[in-house]
Image (cartoon, rainbow, N blue to C red):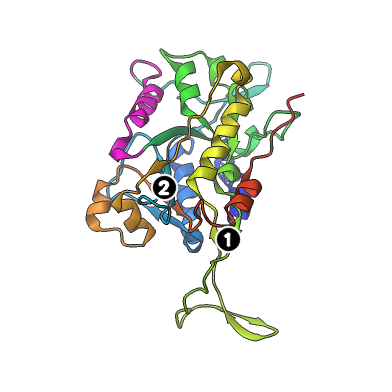
Amino acid sequence: MLCEFAHSFPIHLANLLERDRHLTRNFREETGTDALMMGLVPLEPFGIHVDFPDEAVTGADMDWIYAAPHEISGGSYLRLLIQAKRAKEQRLKDGSSYWYYDHLDHGDPKGSQAQTLVSYAATSPDGMATLPLYIFYHPKSALQPAARYRPPVEGVNLTFACDVAAVVADGCGREQKRVGFWRDGFLSLPDLLCWPLIDPLVPPSPPSPGATEFLSARGLEATYYAGAAFHPDLIAERLNSAREESDPASDIDGDLTIARPGQGIPDEITRAIDGKVTKEDRKRLKRPRVVLSTRLTRDDPRFGLARERARRPRRDRR
């Protein structure tokens, strides 16, 4: 169900954004972020917890925190700080058009928003090691299928904020804002959400009286949900692999590891996992937050299989 959502949501969002194509006012990035967050809310049984701040906020649009609370030393986590941008169409005199991110170099001076995002993440805000990303939302007319080694342009794609900051420093031209300029390094929503499911090692707790039951050959059986392998180590390995793949100079530039899990899950994240977010926790939220937790640990006999299944297929660059 998680992977199905990751594959189906981008086209649904693309269709939604397409509706304003010929209007004078466009849906903003907040539309895509709100729709994505709302779509994740029903997935709580798989270990996904969504929280919104009490007040409207600006800046980076989302926190995604992958957590393995049962690891030793207080658990491990990987935090993603995600800034959203929406693609816009530019029509030319000859009738053709192209898509670009109009406000990619937003800020005063130009490009300062991206640099601030990267610099802020580097400070380990809230005491948490943080990796900044950009998430791009595309209307249906901007979509492109995968071509040779190039990934598809989907309703939702992502890239590394450090790459954006390097390009837009002091402002950038229209060519550097085009969707095609960033396409080779695109990640997809399935890169963040498609993970193997794991059955509990112990029988699940008895269902509540109002739980759904399934009719099987053995009679009525209670519903239970398998957890997902949202282990921070596996997330980091997938992101680092994508980073290496997107940079042709990686063989000579050395280590491109930029995603590193942290140790010791903060108490407020533990409360979110346990469904015990307090009013004070919510007041302190700076932006919408998604916490994706797993029961999987490194010493679980299934960890190796989960790692093998979670590896991101490499694109043929020939």
Closest to the observer, 315 or 102: 315
Residue contact between numbered discs 1 and 2, judged by CB atoms under 8 Å? no
Residue drawn at 30 percent across, 52 percent down: 268
Please name whichever residue, 98 or 11, is drawn nearer the observer in this view of the structure.
Answer: 11
Q: Name the N-terminal-most of marks 1 and 2.
A: 2
Q: Position of residue 307 (x, y in %)?
A: 60, 47
Task: State the separation of the CA atoms marked 1 and 2.
Answer: 18 Å
Q: Name the amino acid, label 1.
A: Ile
The image's mark for residue 300 is none
Please name the residue shown 26% across and 58% down the image. 278
In the image, taking residue 105 as reference, residue 309 lies left or right, namely: right
Q: Secondary structure at mark 1?
A: strand
- Residue range corresponding to the magenta coloring: 108-128
Q: Mainly helix, strand or loop, the magenta region?
A: helix
Is residue 31 highlighted in magenta? no
Vertical comparison of 8 with 22: above or below: below
Q: Is residue 179 visible?
A: no
Instruction: Note whether 112 is above or below 300 in the view shown.
Output: above
- Examine the image and state in which quarter residue 188 appears: top right
Count of marks placed on residues: 2
Tell me if residue 113 can be seen. Answer: yes
Q: Residues within 10 Å of mark 2 (few under 14, many from 20)?
A: many
Mark 2 — residue?
76
Q: Residue at x 57, y 39 (%)?
A: 238
| Residue nearer the viewer, 54 or 20 | 54
The residue at which mark 1 appears reads as 198
The answer to whether residue 201 is above or below residue 36 is below
Quarter that holds the C terminus: top right
- Report if residue 124 lies within the magenta region: yes
